[in-house]
Image: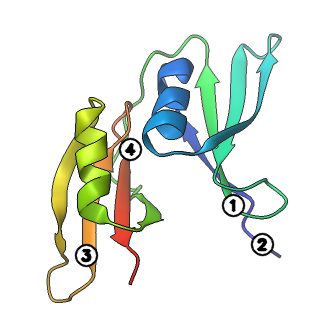
Amino acid sequence: MRLLHTMLRVGDLDRSIAFYTELLGMKLLRRQDYPDGKFTLAFVGYTDERDGTVIELTHNWDTPSYDLGNGFGHLAVEVEDAYAACDKIKAQGGTVVREAGPMKHGTTVIAFVTDPDGYKIEFIQKK
């Protein structure tokens, strides 16, 4: 067994694809419209779906936004330099909600950003 993907519901698919591809450097792997169901699926990731876990972005055409609730935590992405990654996000208009720095009670350097729908992404600096 292996983990295939994580699915996030998004209000504006093009805006979300731009965030994950342009700001986080992922690739758009595939995109498919389902007119009968009035939804579109887009898969983004750093590797091909055969080689790693990816993110499925689901856009229900009649739903402009979602209540994120309090059950979901975050996605985690390993980065070479969390400080530089945050600077890049801010320079391109993204939102950093926790600046890069050592985690509480530890030494690992982390940061948190949000995507256009408010989902949190944790940057974990490579050791």
State the SS at label 2.
loop
The answer for how far apart the CA atoms under marks 4 and 2 are is: 23 Å
Q: Which kind of residue does numbered mark 4 sit on? A: Tyr
Which residue in the protein does label 4 denote? 119
The answer for how far apart the CA atoms under marks 1 and 3 are is: 23 Å
Q: Which kind of residue does numbered mark 2 sit on? A: Arg
CB under 8 Å between discs 1 and 2: yes
Looking at marks 1 and 4 on the same chain, the residue that comes earlier in the sequence is marked by 1
Which residue sits at x=81%, y=18%? 34
Q: Quadrant of residue 94?
A: top left
User: Residue 39, image x and y in percent?
Assistant: 70, 19
Which residue sits at x=21%, y=87%? 107
Looking at marks 3 and 2 on the same chain, the residue that comes earlier in the sequence is marked by 2
Relative to 36, does residue 52 appear above or below in the rendering?
A: below
Going by the image, does 111 lie left or right of 22? Answer: left
Q: Comparing marks 3 and 2, which lies closer to the viewer?
A: 3
CB under 8 Å between discs 3 and 4: no
Crowdedness near tag 2: few (<14), some (14–19) or many (≥20) residues, C-alpha within 10 Å: few
Going by the image, does 99 lie left or right of 26? Answer: left
Which residue in the protein does label 3 denote? 109
Looking at marks 4 and 2 on the same chain, the residue that comes earlier in the sequence is marked by 2
Looking at marks 3 and 4 on the same chain, the residue that comes earlier in the sequence is marked by 3
Which residue in the protein does label 2 denote? 2
Dot label at residue 53: 1
Q: Comparing marks 1 and 2, which lies closer to the viewer?
A: 1
Q: Comparing marks 1 and 4, which lies closer to the viewer?
A: 1
Q: Which kind of residue does numbered mark 3 sit on? A: Val
Q: Quadrant of residue 28?
A: top right
Crowdedness near tag 1: few (<14), some (14–19) or many (≥20) residues, C-alpha within 10 Å: some
